Image: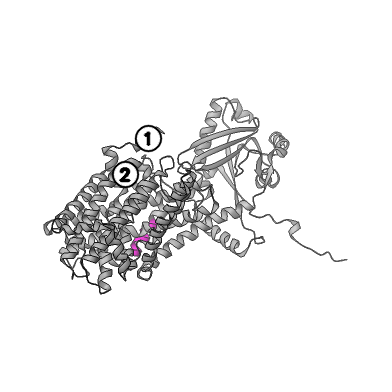
Amino acid sequence: MSDHKSLNKISAAGLLISLGIVYGDIGTSPLYTLRAIFNTVNDSGQAINSVVVLGALSCIIWTLTLQTTIKYVLITLRADNKGEGGIFSLYSLVRKKAKWLVVPAVIGGCALLADGIITPSITVTTAIEGLQVKFPSVSVIPIVISIIALLFIIQQFGTSLVGKLFGPIMFLWFAALGVLGITYVVQDLSILKALNPYYAFHLIASNPMALVILGGVFLCTTGAEALYSDLGHCGRDNIRVSWIFVKATLIINYLGQGVWLLQHPNYDDHLNPFYQIVPEPYLLFMVALATIAAIIASQAMITGSFTLISEAVRLNLWPKVRINYPSNQKGQIYVPSINWLLCGGCIAVVLLFKKSIHMEGAYGLAINMTFLATTILVAVFMRTKRVPKYVITIFLIIYGSLELSFLAGNMTKFLHGGFVTLLIGSALFTVMWSWYVSRKIKNRFVKYVEIEDYYPIISELSEDESVPKYSSQLVYLTSANFKTEIESKIIYSLIQKEPKRADIYWLVHVDVVDEPFTRDYKVEFLIPGKLIRIDFRLGFRVEQRVNLLYRKVIEELVKNGEVDITSQYTSLNRHKIAGDFRFVLLEKHLSRFSKLSFYERTIMAYYFILKKLSLSEERSFGLDSSYVDVEKVPLIFVTPDDIELNRLPV
């Protein structure tokens, strides 16, 4: 709790860290937002005049105000889960309220991952394209691919060292944005009229291209979700205070670009207003700074994707994958499979679209889905906090209308690249949804029995010397939530399949709780000295290294004299040598004869393909394979009652 409070305190270091971690994505949006809007205007044959420029700028300013400032900075940051943020942290806070909430959570999570593929591609490409202002013949694609490849290669070594430089560099970036903007704003103060929301309403109401323009405007707020996702790294107050500075510099820069557009109404489509307001002597410096800012934005998205997947694995929304911890820094994780998936996706996007101007169509559509999902989950969270119903209704109407308008605007870009994002998001959705539904199907067929009925048999089996000893300490992982129950498959494995004699039988149960960093355990002596159950309560951000956790508990129990793990073999017992441990994992497979619908059989078939590609049970639980026996059991037992036979007379 003290860590959470100290993190929330405003400090110079905290403000600098939040600049480096939180604002990379939203901070690089001036590179491409106005270019996207006015290329659309140019293509439609409209003249670039003060009505369109002031209207577009007003839309940007009020989108940043309504969407980023009010929805995320003021409202959503309140939904912190013991100091942690992000769509799965939010889902963990509300998931007990309704089962259907998994749908927006999964859609939002998949859209964020799809965004993790588009963000590095568009930001790095746009930054490097600035070189073409001075060197028109320079080849951008090889430079972009080299930077992206290098960025993903260094992930495995941890980024804590580089991370310390992010804050000062992003401070320099935002200061440069503000200075560049002011140099043009002072040339035409009438641009400040854009602060009036009237111009935004007028543009939306009167311009025939309003929807398409909104699709471009949306690019200014694409990094808003990162504010919430990085809550755990920076603390709410540091994010809120640093946002004042960030928002001011962003708006000033947009206004400066607006002045340049008014001065050059017939500008060439290939020019980027952002680089046109940079004085020529500083162009190369600005390209370098923009590239570093783009790399920082990409790094934030990559790190966010790793966190997202690790949470999805713990919440049973994603197949078990290898997760590494490259440094001792809290929250610093590396997921190899996702790293190379994102890397391949980014390079494919760059090669497919070739120019950042073509990527703008793919960008925005995915994150729009995340915004809608967050709106739904935040509304449910507000209900849990007993916020008056009329306030929640107003929240839903305002943000539902706003985000659906943006969605309509983004859908106009569907054929111009938006379909790519939707394909990526849909592919990720099939993985998450199948993994979630298959678990529900499996749980339906898990049969539990009263464990007390088997106490006498287990006690006698442990003493029965006619049965060869299987192991001194025999451990089963159980999914039974109550100590009175046990899966019938465990009893079948223990007593019938191959009777397993052991000195002590252990049942280990892992319960993933809705708090992020909980590490609790409870021990129940079901048959004193013979059958012991350990229940772990682990937060959704805690690594489930069952082997280490189990051994830690055993050490505590031995130290307290609650259990004796000395080997019962006479020769070893004399020397007080600890007995051996063996884990038994039961792996389910789908028998050909089963009572599943076509939809369920399809889901299960996909699940078993994903299971083959994912981490094995023993590796995902951190178990040493030399101490583990994996037994295959059918998901659905076929009994004689399921088969009809006619006996013919002799």
How crowded pointer 2 is (Cα within 10 Å; few <14, some 14-19, many 20+) is rated as some
Locate the N terminus and report the quarter of the image it occupies. top left
Picture layout, residue 538 above or below residue 223: above
| Residue 32 visible in image | no
The amino acid at mark 2 is: Arg
The amino acid at mark 1 is: Lys
Residue placed furthest toward the left = 281
Give percent across and percent down for residue 438: 57, 56
Q: Which residue is mark 1?
A: 5
Colouring method of the image: one colour
Cβ–Cβ below 8 Å for labels 2 and 1?
A: no
Give percent across and percent down for residue 355: 28, 66
Secondary structure of the residue carrying numbered label 2: helix
25 lies left or right of 318: left
Mark with earlier residue (2, 1): 1
Secondary structure of the residue carrying numbered label 1: helix
Picture layout, residue 256 above or below residue 73: below
Residue 532 sits in quarter: top right
Foreground of the two, 153 or 541: 541
How crowded pointer 1 is (Cα within 10 Å; few <14, some 14-19, many 20+) is rated as few
Give percent across and percent down for residue 487: 65, 45
Q: Which residue is mark 2?
A: 240
Give percent across and percent down for residue 156: 36, 49
Residue 366: within the magenta?
A: no
Residue extent of the magenta highlight: 340-354
Residue placed furthest toward the bottom = 45
Locate the C terminus and report the quarter of the image it occupies. bottom right
Count how many numbered circles sit on residues in the image.
Answer: 2
Q: CA distance from mark 2 to mark 1?
A: 15 Å
Q: Residue at x 22, y 63 (%)?
A: 129
Foreground of the two, 496 or 312: 312
Q: Residue at x 37, y 39 (%)?
A: 328
